[in-house]
Amino acid sequence: MDYKDLRELMVRTQLIPRGIRDKRVLDAMERIPRHLFVDRTTIADAYSDMALPIGEGQTISQPYMVAVMTELLELRGSEKVLEVGTGSGYQSAVLAELARDVYTIERFASLGELAKIRFQDLSFTNIHSRIGDGTLGWLEEAPFDRIIITAGAPEIPEPLIAQLADGGIIVIPVGGLYSQQLLKTRKKGDNLIKEYHTLCVFVPLIGRYGWKRE
């Protein structure tokens, strides 16, 4: 079985049965070569139903979690997206298939630089990356139509709310250090309309407006 077959199997057995319905999301998950975003030592599990370590105490999220967070963003193709927590770059690549531009921030230089090489190798021209404190956002490029945070936080960082365009959506895991719930928030003028979704476990969001230390 080759990697294409494994991606098709992943979509068919892990995503569709759990309720992922957006065809664009399913197609993107079937196209992006997840095995190129994992460590060589875990490549045999690249399409397994689990998160995998990528170094620096970080992980590449379970395929289902990538899919459900992406689907909650309601991407149609014209959006400017901010991602906080580049990690391996896999989520960034999925977003880049579905949005106009992706701006992604990673606090670990080793992970951010490796992800940047992967983006170049895969010829992504609409992913823009930087190293820094993602809880501060990317003020020079704001506002963003969508914001996704791929680490658990006690609450939505205030700078990210400020940098979200009116009508935009933020998806973030919120809760404690060891368990969270996905929160989808839509900005309507001065109001934030919140929806809580699946339970999850993410590494902590470290930064000025996140957890202070792991």
Image (cartoon, grey):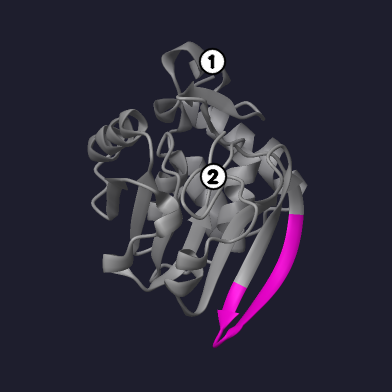
Question: Residue 11: in sight, yes or no?
Answer: no
- Which mark, residue 205? 2
Label 1, residues with CA under 10 Å away: few <14, some 14-19, many ≥20: few
User: Please, is residue 179 above or below residue 71 in the view?
Assistant: above
Residue 117 drawn at (x, y percent): 25, 33
**Residue flagged by tag 1: what amino acid is it?**
Ala
Residue 205 drawn at (x, y percent): 54, 45
Q: Secondary structure at mark 2?
A: loop
Q: Within the magenta stretch, is there residue 19?
A: no
Q: Which residue is mark 1?
A: 44
The residue drawn where x is 71% and y is 43% is: 200
In this rendered view, identify the residue nearer to me: 78 or 134: 134
- Which mark, residue 95? none
In this rendered view, identify the residue nearer to me: 1 or 20: 20
The residue drawn where x is 37% and y is 34% is: 108
**Residue flagged by tag 2: what amino acid is it?**
Leu
The residue drawn where x is 56% and y is 78% is: 187
User: Please, is residue 16 above or below residue 113 in the view?
Assistant: below
Q: Residue 172 falls in which quadrant of the image? A: bottom right
Q: Is residue 160 left or right of residue 151?
A: left
Residue 23 drawn at (x, y percent): 58, 58
User: Please, is residue 209 above or below residue 91 in the view?
Assistant: below
Q: Residue 115 falls in which quadrant of the image? A: top left
The residue drawn where x is 36% and y is 51% is: 104
Q: Which residues are magenta?
A: 186-197
Q: Residue 8 falls in which quadrant of the image? A: top right
Q: Within the magenta stretch, is there residue 196?
A: yes
Question: Residue 84: in sight, yes or no?
Answer: yes
Q: Is residue 76 left or right of residue 156?
A: left
Residue 26 drawn at (x, y percent): 57, 50
Point out the residue furthest to the top here: 41
Q: Secondary structure at mark 1?
A: helix
